[in-house]
Amino acid sequence: MTSVVTGAFGYIGKSIARKLLETGEDVRTVTTHWRRADPFNSAVSAFPYDFDHPALLTDHLRGVTTLYNTYWIRFEQRGMTFAQAVRNTSILFECARSAGVEKIVHISVTRASEGSSLAYYAGKARQESALKDSGIAYAILRPTLVFGDGDILVNNIAWLMRRFPVFPIFGSGAYRLQPVFVEDLAALAIRASRDPTSTTTDVIGPEEFTFKGFLEVISTQVRPGIPLIRFPPWAGIATGQLIGMAVRDVILTADELRGLMDEMLTSEQAPNGSKRFSEWVVQRRETLGRRYASELARHFSPAGSI
């Protein structure tokens, strides 16, 4: 079998590609970073997205059984918008149909809704609609907050805790989240590819935290005793923008914070991930947050992958 994983040199895509290679599948990737150093020692053939040349993109997908799609952008930047990302996704799915791809496994997000006032979640829902309209069998996986090696969010929380005297809790800190391990997401994606039916499933870990509790789990391992101070959300965003200017990155957007505080990263579904965030943080306590991970430097360009 041959699979294409979009963004296989990135975060979620890398975990999926690695597991596919372990099963003996032939793996290709279409990616923004097709000239980037290959973490798979040439075991994964890399091609550019070629959204402006659909015939080329279709050729990259010929002979492929399953397309694992992680393509998206975290925020709008450098001329790239959520609307453009949705259009690019529609092109990708149309090219997959033309190439004869049998199934698409698509990584979305919990509580995606076209009616959402948050552009990230509305755009994710439009991606899902484009997939359903493609006529190809699909599995839509909707993860919550994804953690694991190569993560940006948790790593940078730890980085900030190691370097600043206090850490902000936005508002009450009582809002919930249910983090899921990236390797669990990858395993569920591959399992879903074997199911002949079309499905939509949330992907959530076994633990639920308040945001305050989530921060406490991290701080206990990387900076015990650091004060967690309540900040008004606007003050937290303003502080994040100042730090972002210093590191030349976007640390947190207002929409991301609102999604967090509105408990968008939760699900009513029973957990289907097994790795506990609290255990993973203990295992990574010596390395977590030692270096800053830049979203702009690592991922963001005219097209990107989550």
Image: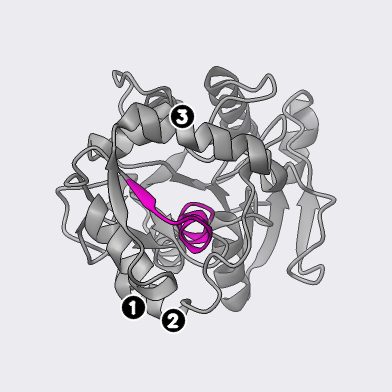
Numbered circle sitting on residue 143: none
Residue at disc 2, secondary structure: helix
Residue at disc 3, secondary structure: helix
Quarter placement of the C terminus:
top right
Circles 1 and 2: CB atoms closer than 8 Å: yes
Q: How far apart, in angstroms, are the residues tagged by discs 3 and 1? A: 32 Å
Where is mark 2, residue-wise?
283
> For residue 14, which quarter of the picture?
bottom right
Residue depth check, mark 3 versus mark 1: number of the one nearer the observer:
3
50 lies left or right of 198: right
Specify start and end residues of the magenta stretch as a single range.
152-168
Q: Looking at the picture, which amino acid does disc 3 mark? A: Ala
Residue 210 to residue 88: above or below:
below
Disc 1 crowd rating (10 Å Cα; few below 14, some 14-19, many 20+) is few
- Nearer the observer, 195 or 300: 300
Where is mark 1, residue-wise?
279
Query: Reading the chain from its start, which is encountered first: label 3 or label 1?
Result: 3
Where is mark 3, residue-wise?
238
127 lies left or right of 48: left
Disc 2 crowd rating (10 Å Cα; few below 14, some 14-19, many 20+) is few
Q: How far apart, in angstroms, are the residues tagged by discs 1 and 2? A: 6 Å
Q: Which residue is drawn at 47% across and 35% down?
A: 239
Q: Is residue 128 visible?
A: no
Q: Residue at x 54, y 64 (%)?
A: 289
